[in-house]
Amino acid sequence: MHVLPYLVAVHLFLTGCYGLATSRNLIHAVGCLAVCQSATYVLLLAVGYRDGGTAPVFSDVRPGSRPVVDPVVQALTLTDIVVGATVTALLLALVLQIAKRHGTVDPDELRELRG
Amino acid sequence: MNRLRLWLLAVGGAGLAALLVAACLELPGFGGDRHPYGDRAVHASLLRHTANTVASVNFDQRAYDTLGEMSILFAAVLGCVVLLRQARDEHRAPPEPAEVARPVRRYALLVLPVALVTGLYVIAHGQLSPGGGFQGGVVAATALHLLYLGADYGALERVRPLGVYQTTDALAVGAYLVMGLAPVLAGTAFLANTLLPYGTFGTLSSGGAVPLLNAAIGMEVASAAVVLLAHFLDQAVEIEEEHGR
């Protein structure tokens, strides 16, 4: 099964989407967004994998002696993690304010805007 | 209403799933040998004597992207600080010192310096071994918070003058920009890694500007994490709503 890792990423992404759409709690929704994002980590790392490859770090591997996995997608995953963490923090701060101002974290109860 | 929404979700989700699976079937096979970008990145990294190719991609080949990434981090922290500030109808109450179980206290105080040094080590060796500014910064920042577990919130606040960390955050972003502008003054491109000697492969001073940019990012991430956690902890521990609301 050479597409299995990619399908795992698809499955994770759709699971996160389902959670986002059916969520009755904003904190739960932020968690679902994090699940969606973890699908991109799986996809990126699966794209970069190479059979028999090791980490692209040459501190103890002689350059050229072994195949290494793709460092570009690893760097992209790092970017993804940083952006994901900051977005999660920002969203959680928003949820905190909503809970304080409206007394609820259920998105369905947030119908009207209040000043 | 709810039923309709679920149906809509099911139809849309099924369509998206079909498209994604079709896309997956067209992707190059898992574990394949063809990685043109990866091979070129490894080659460029070795030319510049950077043992950790991921660090080379982040701070040399794609240093401009990392600038954007750190701006996102900076802006997000700024947004959190604004969102989590003390509102007009709230007041601060110093938290009661809590009892901490002796083994927890002992273990936290024992591990704190080890974790702090590990974080700094990971930042400093970013160009040599797995790690770098982002990872090491988070380790160093979380190490400080062992004080919150091992002692209490007051102890954490004494080692965490928030203004200093906020200033450090801004200074680190500024330092990255200055290091990007230095090559421009010397006549090459923004953030080009050409000014400093590349050093001996596998030593601390290898990689040209990579260790310096790593250090700037490490400073930014560490202080950003401290500031973020401080504001969330303030909300949980110190800030209380006025009574009668």
Image: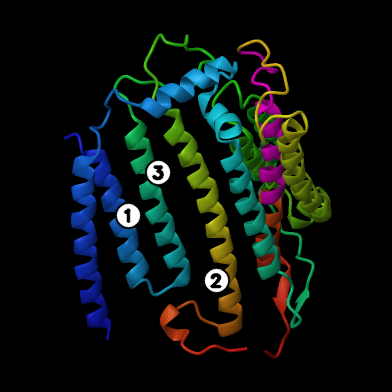
Mark before the other along the chain sequence, 2 or 3: 3
Q: Are marks 2 and 1 on the same chain?
A: yes
Q: Are marks 3 and 1 on the same chain?
A: yes
Q: Is residue A52 magenta?
A: no
Q: Position of residue B94 (x, y in %)?
A: 79, 67
Q: Is residue B206 magenta?
A: yes
The residue carrying pointer 3 sits among few (fewer than 14), some (14 to 19) or many (20 or more) residues within 10 Å by Cα, namely some
Chain to which mark 2 belongs: A
Residue that label 2 marks: A95
Residue that label 3 marks: A41
Q: Amino acid at mark 1?
A: Phe
User: Please, which residue is most extreme toward the front here?
Assistant: B187
Q: Main secondary structure of the magenta part?
A: helix
Closer to the camera, B60 or B143? B60
Q: Position of residue A33 (x, y in %)?
A: 42, 60
Magenta segment boundaries in residue numbering = B202-224
Q: Position of residue B79 (x, y in %)?
A: 65, 64
Q: Quadrant of residue B124?
A: top right
Q: Is residue B84 visible?
A: no
Residue that label 1 marks: A13
- Left or right: residue A72 compared with residue B173: left
